[in-house]
């Protein structure tokens, strides 16, 4: 069976990642796009999800790439229509939204996939295997990038529910919660919020593993020049460094693996398998850590930011 899919929200991430990945993946075809401001090539186009669902009765799945603030209602509508759902990260604006979608998908017997793309970076599985038999001593995360480059002209990302710097920061947390074989809890956080924004531009998190190893994370959206996506782990007397978002692995300073970014094709292969089994894959551990940071973090006003 080939999945007939419709995509909602034809913005930068959809064009840069989703469309090329679908083209590469066997077992899934894009047949429709719903977007207020853009048109997909070679597919049927609709102004919104409702019109797409009404006009495409044979569509099997819906891929949701809109801002997280509106994703819950769209996902619920698609699930109620009996469609499998692929959620771009973060899977929702709140933990309770995603929990409700999981329950609804189970009730309707359809797939719900929360796609943490950074978990599919080339070196993540090898890093997880290296850590598994070792006692973790400490973890340090540096996730610094230039918002003007990665999110140009996207005001929603600065609004309440838009996550701010946690939009990329949650990628680091998705890797962290994948490679650490025990729960990670948040101890404290500080959030730098520009005077003219509702969401943070920088954040510092103090966390710990269940066995007490310290985990520190710094997220910053003001970095220019080379971007930094590093996770350093000290465990069992050795050191591991995941860099380039998880696509490069160093053990004790020596490069073990360096590979190109193929995260989205890997996710679509996963989605095809989940749909075949009508299974659900919707881990909320990364989202829960972000929610905890907003819940108990100190809000630190900072200079207005114009992007």
Image (cartoon, grey):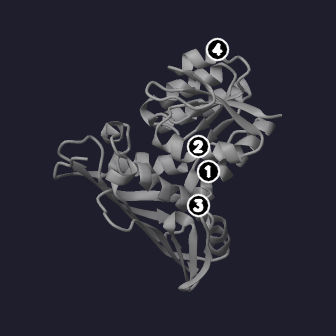
Quadrant in the rendering for residue 7 = top right
Q: Please name the residue that numbered disc 3 is placed on.
A: 261
Figure quadrant of the N terminus: top right
For numbered disc 3, what is the local secondary structure? loop
User: Tag 2 or tag 3, which sits nearer the N-term?
Assistant: 2
For numbered disc 4, what is the local secondary structure? helix
Left or right of 140, for residue 274: right
Q: Please name the residue that numbered disc 2 is placed on.
A: 18
Q: Distance of mark 1 from mark 3, alpha carbons?
A: 8 Å
User: Tag 3 or tag 4, which sits nearer the N-term?
Assistant: 4
Q: Residues within 10 Å of mark 3 (few under 14, many from 20)?
A: some
Q: Nearer the viewer, residue 302 or 229?
A: 229
At x 43%, y 53%, the residue is 168
Q: Residues within 10 Å of mark 2 (few under 14, many from 20)?
A: many
Residue positioned most to the right: 1
Q: Residues within 10 Å of mark 1 (few under 14, many from 20)?
A: many
Q: Is residue 181 visible?
A: no
Quadrant in the rendering for residue 236 = bottom right
Percent x, y of residue 201: 29, 52
Using the image, tell me which numbered label, if any, was put on residue 150. Answer: none
Percent x, y of residue 17: 56, 47
Q: Please name the residue that numbered disc 4 is placed on.
A: 55
Left or right of 256, for residue 12: left
Percent x, y of residue 242: 53, 71
User: Tag 1 or tag 2, which sits nearer the N-term?
Assistant: 2
Percent x, y of residue 261: 58, 60
Q: Distance of mark 4 from mark 1, alpha carbons?
A: 28 Å
User: Tag 4 or tag 2, which sits nearer the N-term?
Assistant: 2
Q: Distance of mark 2 from mark 1, alpha carbons?
A: 7 Å
């Amino acid at each position: 069976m080939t999945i007939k899919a419709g995509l909602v929200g034809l913005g930068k991430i959809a064009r840069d990642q989703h469309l090329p990945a679908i083209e590469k993946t066997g077992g899934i075809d894009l047949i429709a796009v719903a977007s207020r401001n853009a048109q997909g090539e070679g597919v049927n186009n609709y102004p919104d999800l409702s019109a797409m669902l009404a006009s495409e009765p044979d569509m099997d799945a819906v891929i949701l790439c809109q801002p997280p603030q509106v994703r819950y209602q769209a996902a619920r509508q698609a699930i109620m229509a009996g469609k499998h759902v692929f959620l771009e990260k973060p899977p929702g604006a709140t933990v309770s939204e995603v929990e409700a979608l999981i329950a609804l998908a189970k009730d309707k017997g359809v797939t719900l996939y929360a796609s943490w793309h950074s978990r599919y970076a080339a070196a993540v599985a090898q890093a997880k295997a290296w850590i598994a038999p070792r006692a973790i001593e400490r973890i340090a995360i540096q996730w610094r990038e230039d918002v003007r480059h990665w999110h140009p002209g996207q005001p929603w990302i600065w609004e309440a529910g838009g996550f701010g710097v946690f939009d990329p920061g949650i990628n680091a947390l998705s890797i962290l919660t994948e490679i650490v074989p025990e729960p990670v809890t948040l101890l404290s956080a500080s959030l730098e919020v520009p005077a003219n924004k509702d969401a943070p531009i920088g954040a510092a998190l103090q966390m710990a593993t269940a066995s007490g190893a310290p985990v520190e994370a710094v997220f910053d959206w003001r970095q220019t020049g080379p971007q930094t996506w590093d996770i350093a782990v000290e465990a069992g007397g050795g050191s591991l460094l995941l860099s380039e978002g998880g696509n490069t692995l160093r053990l004790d300073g020596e490069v073990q693996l360096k590979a190109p970014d193929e995260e989205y094709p890997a996710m679509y292969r996963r989605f095809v398998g989940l749909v075949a089994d009508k299974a659900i894959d919707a881990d909320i551990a990364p989202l829960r850590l972000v929610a905890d940071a907003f819940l108990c973090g100190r809000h630190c006003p900072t200079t207005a930011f114009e992007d």
